[in-house]
Amino acid sequence: MSLVSGKEVHVMSNKKNVIILVVLVLLIGFTSYVISTKVLNRRDNNDNNTSGRTNTRAEVDNMFAISFFREVNRNRTENYLISPYSVEMALNLLREGTKNNSKKEIDEVIGNRNIKDIAVKNKIEIANALFIKNHYKDVIESKYVNKLKKDYKSEIIYDAFATPDKINDWVNNKTNKMIPRILDSISSEFVLGMANAIAIDVKWAKQFDCSLTKSHEFTTKDGDVIDVEMMHDIDSNGRYFKVDAAEGVILPYTRYDENTGEEEYEEDKGSQLELIAILPKGNLGSYVDGFTSNDLDKIDSFKFDRSKYTLNLYIPRFTYEYDLADFKEVLISMGIKEVFTTKADLTNIISEKNGGKSIYVSDTIHKTYIELAESGTKAAAVTYFGVSKSAAYNPDEKETITLEFNKPFMYIIRDVDSKEIVFMGTVYEPNKWKGNTCKE
């Protein structure tokens, strides 16, 4: 005999349907939340591109450069200069030797793209090298060596490497003596090293008049007022811009023949390299922390009508060198970790059977130099990874815009056509005034 009536069965069935419906609604809601969260996170990680639009090629190419710049900027209030181009190139040399998770970590940070050529013979020199200790010559994978020779035009240098002289000589030569040395000693555990060096020596399309360089006040981050060497151009050919939180200028360098390196004077051809000097309205550190490729996009799209405005430009002369002492920590914070540990998988360099699981990246160096003066700009960078074995507006009248870089600012040097960022830096304290030492 049944203990449950037909009515009760109907009620229970309805309750069951309600429960199923509630569960489905909750599942759909949770799924929507997860998907939306992933989309938002992907946008946040995609260089703060929250507009939902597809990133341009230039933005994708510059994502690593800007991310690296922002990471370096953390807790820094000093003059510094980095070369994202050099770092990315050196990381590519390293990536070719990695496998599995070690390769995955590098790929997730720098992406997988072809770095564009920015070389102008005799003016922008880029060089790669692989330094192999003689003792390991026969166990280094030939496929890795040939890949670096063919795809990256790397010099392959064999030596006993009892001292770092050969590496330092290469760096000194490839940076036109701007960075004389990077290593004071070399470990007995040294297996090989890889390096990228870049050096530029270019003139402004319109040089600054030395006689106009004067002592000028500059307010430091602490509010102190100091006298600095301020260059002045009364009618600058720079392109002024004003965006949300900053203003600044884009200054073109002169154009050079691609083959000879000699100056070209055809105005209609435009420039190959340019400097972007950015003066934030507020704190420089905070501005850099929030800087994205979208900000660079806004700068590029700003229209400056030279027929209506004259740019009266003041920008300080500065020279400094910089050693990114915490280079490894910066890379680790960006997600490249395993290659610096005994878990590193560099078996594309030395096979596992030949001991490739026992090598790791032991040395990380990034050094730079810049000299910005009336005639132009000289700059250099070297990135080095050492691998060791485990020890076990007015329409009638021109309006004048006065732009004074009289407080901390940032700057970018990039290729005009490809938009590859070669150097990025900050100026917290320019050269102090010592009388006009400018040479005509």
Image (cartoon, helix red, strand yellow):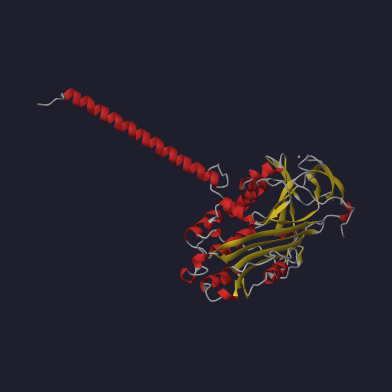
Q: Is residue 58 visible?
A: no
Please tell me how many numbered marks the rendered image carries.
0
In the drawing, does residue 22 fall left or right of residue 88? left
Q: Residue at x 70, y 71 (%)?
A: 165
Q: At which x and y percent is residue 317?
A: 81, 53
Q: Residue furthest left?
A: 1
Q: Quarter-wise, where is residue 395 in the image?
A: top right
In the drawing, does residue 42 fall left or right of residue 376? left
In this rendered view, identify the residue nearer to me: 269 or 373: 373
Q: Quarter-wise, where is residue 152 in the image?
A: bottom right
In the drawing, does residue 223 fall left or right of residue 6? right
In the picture, which quadrant includes the C terminus? bottom right
In this rendered view, identify the residue nearer to me: 366 or 191: 191
Q: At which x and y percent is residue 69?
A: 64, 51
In the drawing, does residue 180 fall left or right of residue 337? right
Q: Is residue 18 visible?
A: yes
Q: At which x and y percent is residue 164?
A: 68, 69
Can you say whether 435 is above or below 360 in the image? above
Can you say whether 29 is above or below 163 in the image? above
In this rendered view, identify the residue nearer to me: 408 or 151: 408
In the picture, which quadrant includes the N terminus? top left
Q: Quarter-wise, where is residue 226 in the image?
A: top right
Q: At which x and y percent is residue 216?
A: 86, 46
Can you say whether 388 is above or below 326 in the image? below
